[in-house]
Amino acid sequence: MTENQRLNFLFNRQLQRLNSTEEKEEFLLLMADPCHKEQVKSLLKRYWDEFDENEFSPAVLLFGDGEEILSKIQSENIYPLPQSQRRPKYWIGIAAALAILIFGASLFYLKQNAGSAEFTDANSHIVPGSTGATLKLANGKTIKLSDAVNGELANDAGVSITKTKNGLLIYEIKGTTLPDQINTLSTNNGETYQVRLPDGSLVWLNAASSLSYSTALVHSGKRSVSLVGEAYFEIAKDKKHPFIVKTGSQEVEVLGTHFNVNAYGDESTAKTTLLEGSVKIKNKTNQKIIVPGEQATVNGADISVDKVNTEYAIAWKNGVFRFTDKTLEAGMLEVARWYNVQVIYKRPELKNELLGGRISKYANINQVLKKMELAKAFKFTVKGREIVVE
């Protein structure tokens, strides 16, 4: 494989502590790119042969194990992947650990000082999303939760609905409920919200999503909700009442478990990722049972099951864009929903560019786009609330 001469150059400059802020950012990107795996290992080995352990403070050795260190290297960096590399296997262990030994704290200068970088104010009108949602009650009343005061919002049809100071919506049954009384919790672009259902189950709702459920929750012996968009569920155990999540193309049935469902209407597939317990996914013609660490994908009549890194599926819940194994189009769909923007492609083939890496969902939009542009495979132009990719 042809060596990346720029990586060699920046590596040597880093050893001498000569890299500028921009060069350190570029260097991190090249180090994290799995395309340079062998080259980086070779560079580190060469330095290791001359390494004097007395040169470094013992504190440098306390950053964590190989995988944690690699996570630091890849954190806040996005990079393109070869078209053939759908599921890259990142190098970990001694090569990553040596990076810490060699570069110490200065390697992570950008991560630790992310707030001090200079950005223009031209796109200051595009801000990250925040906690917010709209609750539509069965009686037709609509409550904008970001504007509502904390405390009890409603006491209707035998159910008390309370908003906590932490932005959690809590349902409690305090009387006789009716199964045909349907409430809907919905988020717009740039909103996310958490709700605790009457059975104690917790649901995190992603941007541009909606969750509908009866005030009783239990109907005909089952707990049932309908989802459009994406949500993460932590279901309270109740063997007598299975929990059903209905989307446009599938039903997910559980007893008590943790899982994520992605079923946006503008995407061709629905994906269910299981973290704990077991779930059954079924559509009109097929059904599959998955175990922790698996993801079921419903595409038309087909249901496929794959082993996945579950942390990637719930990165959105943890405040991160995780682009590994995603195309540019899939990644930008997430960006569009969260920052409430539209994405336009000058060249449609760019949609299929493969990405790796991650970045905080609460980063300035300029930071997100700037780091993506470092991949050199595409560039962005922001016009109002439109992001043009070319």
Image (spheres, grey):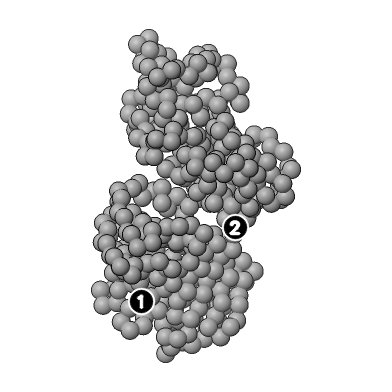
The quadrant the C terminus occupies is top right
Q: Based on the displayed image, in which of its 4 quarters is residue 114 positioned?
A: top right
| Image position, residue 253 (x, y; %) | 31, 69
Q: Residue 288 or 202: which is nearer the viewer? A: 288
Residue on which disc 2 sits = 190
Disc 1 is placed on an element classified as: strand
| Vertical side of 238 occupied by 305: above or below | above
- Given residues 182 and 303, the one toward you in this image is 303
Is 250 on the left or on the right of 108, as rendered?
left
Label 1 environment density (alpha carbons within 10 Å; few <14, some 14–19, many ≥20): many
Q: Percent position (x, y) of residue 387?
A: 65, 46
At horizontal 51% and vertical 68% (from top left) the residue drawn is: 210
Q: Position of residue 60 (x, y in %)?
A: 42, 25
Q: Is residue 65 left or right of residue 107?
A: left
Relative to 90, does residue 1 appear above or below in the rendering? above
Q: Is residue 336 visible?
A: yes
Name the amino acid type tagged 2.
Gly
Q: Earlier in the sequence, mark 1 or mark 2?
A: 2
At label 1, which amino acid type do we have? Arg
Residue 366 appears in the rendering: no
Residue 223's disc is: 1
Q: Residue furthest top?
A: 50
Q: Identify the residue at horizontal 57%, vertical 16% (top origin).
A: 18
